[in-house]
């Protein structure tokens, strides 16, 4: 079991370039999430998905798009990168326990993105 | 106001010491609470869930005070390996999690 994997691990972009971050999970989890983490701030939710073919906006969705065509994959796209999108991006997945309302999220190792 | 607020620290303690810190949350309807651990430049990992009656996991004790809307974590007999950032996490609607910015703990020999 690889758990949650992310590619690439590092990337440097120039302003205006586009890229896609790939997240994959092999735990058959229904829910998947994209976060960004900046110094001195908690993880902030960008977009999330509660199932294949569905996505929803999180706290900071502007400038990002997502797709969940397959249950195991969740893609995060930056159409026109800006320096403000320099951050560490984490993907996570979970399988909510609806009876208890508890849901541990499992995180990928992160992608370190720098936009010049 | 942030949904989850934590004292960023750092808490610098000697091996064997006890260290404790809190976080506060703003949404009184929150139902689930967690502590995650994050090592430098690594992904967060679940340390423990926090239950209403308080709970222990080895040297770690978590408490929840719903009336005052705060959660605490206590680490007894600190080890060098406990050095990390501890994230306070609160469950919201749609199983979304709200994260605090983290409390940094450094255990010195």
Image (cartoon, rainbow, N blue to C red):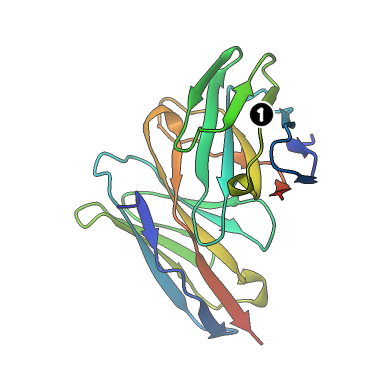
Residue in view at x 54 percent, y 84 percent: B13
Q: Is residue A63 above or below residue B82?
A: above
Residue in view at x 55 percent, y 78 percent: B77
Residue in view at x 60 percent, y 25 percent: A65
Q: Residue furthest front?
A: A16
Q: Circle 1 is placed at which residue position?
A: A79
Residue A74, given in percent of the width and then of the height, sits at 67, 25
- Tell me which corner region of the image, top left, top right, bottom left or bottom right, holds residue B24: bottom left
Q: Is residue A92 left or right of residue B102?
A: right
Q: Is residue B91 above or below residue A72?
A: below
Q: Is residue B42 above or below residue B14?
A: above
Q: Is residue B4 left or right of residue A61?
A: left
Give SS at disc 1: loop
- Tell me which corner region of the image, top left, top right, bottom left or bottom right, holds residue B80: bottom right
- Tell me which corner region of the image, top left, top right, bottom left or bottom right, holds residue B78: bottom right
User: Disc 1: which chain?
Assistant: A
Q: Is residue B35 visible?
A: yes
Q: Is residue A110 visible?
A: no
Q: Is residue B38 left or right of residue A114?
A: left
């Amino acid at each position: 079991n690889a758990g949650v994997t992310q590619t690439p691990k590092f990337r440097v972009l120039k302003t205006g370039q586009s890229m896609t971050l790939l997240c994959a999970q092999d735990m058959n989890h229904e829910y998947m999430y994209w976060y960004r983490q900046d110094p001195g701030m908690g993880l902030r939710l960008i977009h999330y998905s509660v199932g294949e073919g569905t996505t929803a906006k999180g706290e900071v969705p502007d400038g990002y798009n997502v797709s969940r065509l397959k249950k195991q994959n969740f893609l995060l796209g930056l159409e026109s990168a800006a320096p403000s999108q320099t951050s560490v991006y984490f993907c996570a997945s979970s399988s909510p326990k609806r009876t208890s309302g508890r849901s541990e999220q499992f995180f990928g190792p992160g992608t370190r993105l720098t936009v010049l | 106001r942030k949904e989850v607020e934590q004292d960023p620290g750092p808490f610098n303690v000697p091996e064997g010491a006890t260290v404790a810190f809190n976080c506060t949350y703003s949404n009184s309807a929150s139902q689930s609470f967690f502590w995650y651990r994050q090592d430098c430049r690594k992904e967060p990992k679940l340390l423990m869930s926090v239950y209403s009656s308080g709970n222990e996991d080895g040297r770690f004790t978590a408490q929840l005070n719903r009336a005052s809307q705060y959660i605490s974590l206590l680490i007894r007999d600190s080890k060098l390996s406990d050095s990390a950032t501890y994230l306070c996490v609160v469950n919201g609607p749609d199983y979304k999690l709200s994260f605090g910015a983290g409390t940094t703990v450094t255990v010195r020999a």
